[in-house]
Image: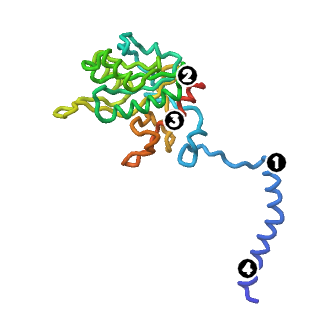
Amino acid sequence: MNKTNYSYIGIAFIILLFGIIFIPKIIDRVKNNDVTRNKRISVGQDNNFENKGDLAFIEINGKPKKVPAFSFINQDGKTITQDDYKGKVYVVEFFFTTCPTICPRMNRNLVNIQNVFSNTKDFGVASFSITPEIDTPEVLKEYANKYGITNPNWNLMTGDETEIYKLANVGFNIFVGKVENDEIGFEHSGDFALIDKNGFIRSRLDAFGNPKIFYKGIISEQEKMDEDGNEEEITMLKEDIKKLLNE
């Protein structure tokens, strides 16, 4: 037998000896909870959203972002401010009644959500018109009836255009703008913002552990995803509304 074979026999003997002596000790430590698996702290693709913890706050310069003060007129001619939503969880959108594209889809999805929480007095919606010169309280009232908006905490609001655009672009960071030489003349985000009972903007985390900030409002649960492969987030929004209602 050559030296190489002796070396293999020696290595095998050492491995066997290690198994006999140390493996039973390791098993005992596991049984006694001395050795535990590391907890996964990553938030992402292998975790279900339902199992995640509290919803994140949206922080600006290290401070949770809160809904700024506003005052507008709703579909019933009443003045509505941020104080009317105190103690309520609510969804925010920017829309206009003559929008022929994304607004009907957004509001059908919101009506779907409204109906899920029909018996919840602490849930509401804040819809701000970006064409206030067209969307008078009377027009907004007709629009509400058309879409089956029945929640008493769903206010469709109109008012000073400059203030509405400031509220959208600065207050919520939801894009709203005018488009020159365009048939419609306006463009805006189809995203929804979710607000907690204390007026803070909240959202769940994405696969990288960052707040999603907004929820896609255009794609319905029935559609599942759009032509670009973006998945619907209405189901997600419903789940997160429930979480905030239970806080």
Residue type at tag 1: Asn
Instruction: Please say if the residues under marks 1 and 3 sit with CB atoms less than 8 Å apart.
Output: no
Q: Where residue 167 appears, x then y in whole percent? A: 35, 22
Up-down relation of residue 6 to residue 49 (above or below) = below
Q: Position of residue 150 (x, y in %)?
A: 45, 21
Determine whether the residue tagged by mark 3 lies in a helix, strand or loop. Answer: loop
Mark 1 secondary-structure assignment: loop
Can you identify the residue that label 2 sits on? 120
The residue that label 4 is drawn on is 8
Q: Nearer the viewer, residue 44 or 231?
A: 231
Color scheme of the displayed model: rainbow
In the rendered image, which residue does mark 1 sit on? 32
Q: Earlier in the sequence, mark 2 or mark 1?
A: 1
* Disc with the residue nearer the chain's start (1 vs 4): 4
Q: Tell me which corner region of the image, top left, top right, bottom left or bottom right, holds residue 51.
A: top right
Q: Residue at x 55, y 43 (%)?
A: 43
**Which label lies toward us, 1 or 4?**
1
Q: Nearer the viewer, mark 4 or mark 2?
A: 2
Please name the amino acid that badge 3 sits on. Arg
